[in-house]
Amino acid sequence: MIRLFKVKETQKVLAQNPNGEVPTKKQSAGELRLHNDITELNLPNCCTISFPNGKDDLMNFEVSPVYPHDAPKVKCIPKVYHPNIDYEGNVCLNTLRED
């Protein structure tokens, strides 16, 4: 229950700050979790990551400071036709739902 109050307090500070920045002294649990997930991501040797024409800005990820409680916003920059991407490029997956 105490954690819920902290989330509500952080959301209130975000709403009051016009820049959307939260003055934080240490990383939140969500930031630590996201950092660990990314650093522990290991691809097998048979998989490679390559970008067409040298571009690496195909997707835009926005993760809020209260990450486990608010879904990240994912947007596809180039226009593609995919059942999980709407006309504005927003990725629509059940794991990213806002409700």
Image (spheres, rainbow, N blue to C red):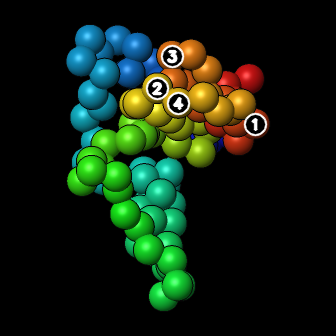
Secondary structure beneath label 3: loop
What residue is shown with label 3? 88
Residue 51 position (above or below residue 8): below
* Res. 94 mark: 1
Q: Nearer the viewer, mark 2 or mark 3?
A: 2
Residue in front for this viewpoint, 58 or 3: 58
Q: Is residue 15 above or below residue 53?
A: above
Image label count: 4
In primary-sequence order, the first of circles 1 and 3 is 3
Distance from the alpha carbon under mark 3 to that under mark 4: 10 Å
| Residue at the outermost front position | 53
Q: In terms of secondary structure, where does tag 4 sit? A: loop
Q: Which residue is mark 4?
A: 80
- Residue shown at the point (61%, 21%) measured from the top left: 86
Distance from disc 2 to disc 1, alpha carbons, whole Å, reads: 21 Å
Q: Nearer the viewer, mark 1 or mark 4?
A: 4
User: Looking at the image, which residue is at 52% across and 42% down?
Assistant: 67
The amino acid on which the numbered mark 4 sits, given as a three-letter code, is Val
Mark drawn on residue 7: none
Categorize mark 4 by other alpha carbons within 10 Å: few (<14), some (14-19), many (20+).
few
Image quarter where the C terminus lies is top right
Pointers 1 and 3 in contact (CB under 8 A)?
no
Give the alpha-carbon distance from disc 4 to disc 2, as whole Å. Answer: 4 Å
